[in-house]
Image (tube, coloured by chain):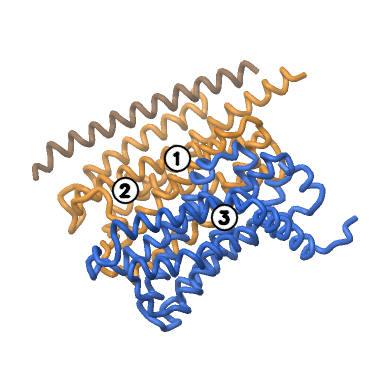
Chain colours: A brown, B orange, C blue
Amino acid sequence: MPAAESLVWVAAVTAVIWAGVFSYCLALDRRVRRLEDGE
Amino acid sequence: MNRRTVRNWALGLWMLIVIWAAFFYAPAAQGFKGESARIVFFHVPQAWVAVLAFCVNLIASLRYMRTRDPLDDARAATAARLGLIFSILATVTGSLFARVMWGSFWNWDPREVSIAILLLVYAAYFALREAIPDDERRASLSASYAVLAFVTMPFLIFVVPRIYWSLHPDTIINTRGSLDMESRMFQTLMGSLAGFTWLFFWLYSLDVRLARVKIARQAREGE
Amino acid sequence: MRRSSLASETAAVLAKELRSELRSRVALNAVGLFALTTLIAVAYQIGPYRIHEQDRPHLLAALLWIILFFAALSGLARVFVKEEDAHTAKTLRLAARPLAVFGGKLLFNLLLLLALECCIVPLYLALMGYAVIGVWGLVAVLVTGSLALATTSTLVAAIISRASGSGTLFAVLTVPIALPLLVVLIQGTRAAAASAAFAAVLPALQAIVSLAGVQLVASLYLFPVVWHE
């Protein structure tokens, strides 16, 4: 089984997925903070 | 840069480290097909968070029944929403792992079944909530259902496998059960567990803060 | 101020349920016909001879409980849904204390299940050629299983009757909670069918009884909340 290259690829995809999830969480955090400060 | 921002970016970095560790730091597991075992570093924490969310939901539901505070209901609903997401993730990653390891997506392993039933419980919880337009009634009825589901769970997780195993000794042994792991794998797993738990609490607190704002706004508009 | 005891109020609720049911027979018909139809369909298509010898223990136990469970799903929610539909629920809240209402309706559902099993199980054994060695073990599993199933169903029925009252919602809510019970019931039935020794069914019976016990205790706390919502 070609270990090295495909592993890097899968790791990269996972990292990208996490980047997406993380940015969504950051955006949500910003939104909540704005709403709270607006109160 | 305030404390919260630093904390959030710390989580972002932490998970990147976990991803690196899962693929490059931890060795390939013995007796597993190639590198497939690495999915365990993500699958186990997801299942753990699904159960954790269930516990948080229980506590919030019990609190609601005592306090009748809409914020407690929001807490329960948030926990359930996150629990649903993570149990779907856990089921999917578990399925993928099963496919690589044993050739089929589903094997009726007791733990697989437990996670799937947890998923069904979450889905039922939301189906119930959807069916009730009145806020207070929705809160207390879904809280009651959550408590009932929770007291039933230990049976699924502990009692059924004991009976199940005694009649089906040829069922596939769940290799996740054995914890004699190599130390680097253990470190990675713990790191991933911590990261996912951290992520859960971050999302949970965000949602609860959002609910608090909404409730405050509704209260003001009501005046 | 209540002069009647919990037991007598429970008995009164049960008596009312039985009376109204014997008059109209709606639940009996629904549950009985459902079970009978399913049984006949299964027996006709599968029958005693079309299952391989090694599969028989698994399949016969599982099919029996599928029939019983789905029949239960079709009829056990009625005890509360009909109160909401007929708008008699409010009167009932005033007339009896919550636990008496729960107790009476639980006992009614239990009797309904037991009556169903008295008819269906012998028929099933005969039509499917299911040779059961431990008959008393099977009876024990059926009785305790009915109690557990009735407890779960009655509480969920109370919950959904305060929601939309639809049968689908009842099924959706009951299935995840009843699945562990079903698994144990099927295992217990298999054990009873295979051996007359009490030790064979004991693990299953312990699981069923403790599950029923836990849910009963939970219902004592949860039902008043649901009922007064």
Residue at 36%, 44% (x, y): give it.
B90
> Is residue B53 at least partly visible in the picture?
no
Residue C134: x and y, percent? 42, 79
Element marked by disc 1: helix
Q: Which numbered tag is attached to residue B84?
A: 1
Residue that extends furthest to the front in the rendered view of this protein = C23
User: In this orientation, which residue lies closer to the viewer: A17 or C196?
Assistant: C196
Q: Nearer the viewer, residue C104 or B71?
A: C104
State left or right for residue C117 relative to residue B12. Answer: right
Report crowding for label 2: few under 14, some 14 to 19, many 20 or more residues within 10 A (C-alpha): many
Q: Is residue C198 left or right of residue C22?
A: left
- Taking depth in this image into account, of C145 and C67 the one nearest to the observer is C67
Give the answer, above or below, for where C21 lies relative to C61. Answer: above
Whether callout 3 and callout 2 share a subunit is answered: no
User: Residue A11, image x and y in percent?
Assistant: 23, 36
Observer-nearest of C42 and B31: C42
Q: Which residue is mark 2?
A: B188
- In which chain is the residue bearing label 3? C
Q: Is residue C177 placed above or below B158 in the rendered structure?
A: above
| Chain of the residue under label 2 | B
Q: Residue at x 59, y 40 (%)?
A: C165
Report the side of C123 relative to C158 (left or right): left
Q: Residues within 10 Å of mark 1 (few under 14, many from 20)?
A: many
Which of pointers 2 and 1 lies earlier in the amino acid sequence?
Answer: 1
Mark nearer the viewer, 3 or 2 = 3
Secondary structure beneath label 3: helix
Given the image, what chain letter belongs to the residue carrying mark 1?
B
Give a yes or no on whether discs 1 and 3 share a subunit.
no
Mark yes or no: residue B146 visible: yes
Pointers 1 and 3 in contact (C-beta within 8 Å): no
Question: Which residue does the numbered mark 3 point to in the structure image?
Answer: C28
